[in-house]
Image (cartoon, rainbow, N blue to C red):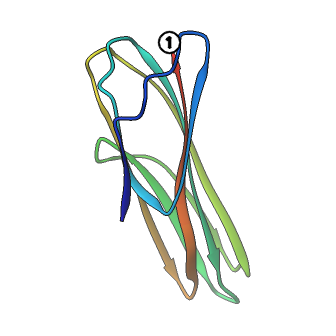
Amino acid sequence: METFKNATLPQQDREFYLNGRGVRAAQLGPYGVPVRIRTRAYGFHRGGGGSTASLTLLHGGAPAGTATDANFDLANLQVIYNIILDPGQAATFAIKSDNHGATERYVGFEFWLSVA
């Protein structure tokens, strides 16, 4: 399992982008300034008939959002979550993916970081 750890602090007037297909866990921070973190957890499942799939984004170990689908051939799931990280703090994220009668093709994260 790949992870992101301690991504680069964005410049004052720029946004820093990370895309990690296949990444299931991430730690961002700590930084010396407040940082806005926009998060998109995504997953793609292939199924058929009575297939079900779910994708849960965890922030600090607690659920921050869930997406589900049922009776699909292809399911593209995503959870969007935004926070402002206080100076000196770190944020941890993880993806929990589950399916029944389907196959997980991939999951991953996208992060956009900017100075808040």
Q: Is residue 37 above or below residue 52?
A: above
Who's the residue at 69% across and 80% down the image?
Answer: 71
Name the residue at 64% across, 87% down.
Answer: 50
Task: Report x, y in % for residue 21.
Answer: 55, 59
- Nearest the viewer among 44 and 11 is 11
Q: Amino acid at mark 1?
A: Ala
How many numbered discs, if any?
A: 1
Choose between 30 and 75: the one closer to the eye: 30
The spot of residue 6 in percent (x, y) is 34, 35
- Quarter of image, res 59: top left
Q: Looking at the rendering, in which quadrant would you find the N terminus?
A: bottom left
> Which residue lies at the image location 46% right of the left edge and 72% below the top edge?
98
Q: Residues within 10 Å of mark 1 (few under 14, many from 20)?
A: some
Question: As drawn, is 65 to the left or to the right of 80?
Answer: left
Instruction: Using the image, determine if residue 16 lies above or below residue 45.
Output: above
Residue 80 located left or right of residue 34: right
Name the residue at 29% across, 25% down: 30
Given residues 72 and 87, the one toward you in this image is 87
Residue 104 placement, left or right of 84: right
Indicate whether 69 appears above or below 87. below
Q: Which residue is mark 1?
A: 116
Q: In the image, is residue 100 above or below residue 108?
A: below
Q: Position of residue 68 (x, y in %)?
A: 58, 64
Q: Identify the secondary structure beneath mark 1.
A: loop
Q: Quadrant of residue 31?
A: top left
Q: What residue occupies the far right of the structure in this picture?
A: 73
Q: Position of residue 38 (x, y in %)?
A: 55, 32
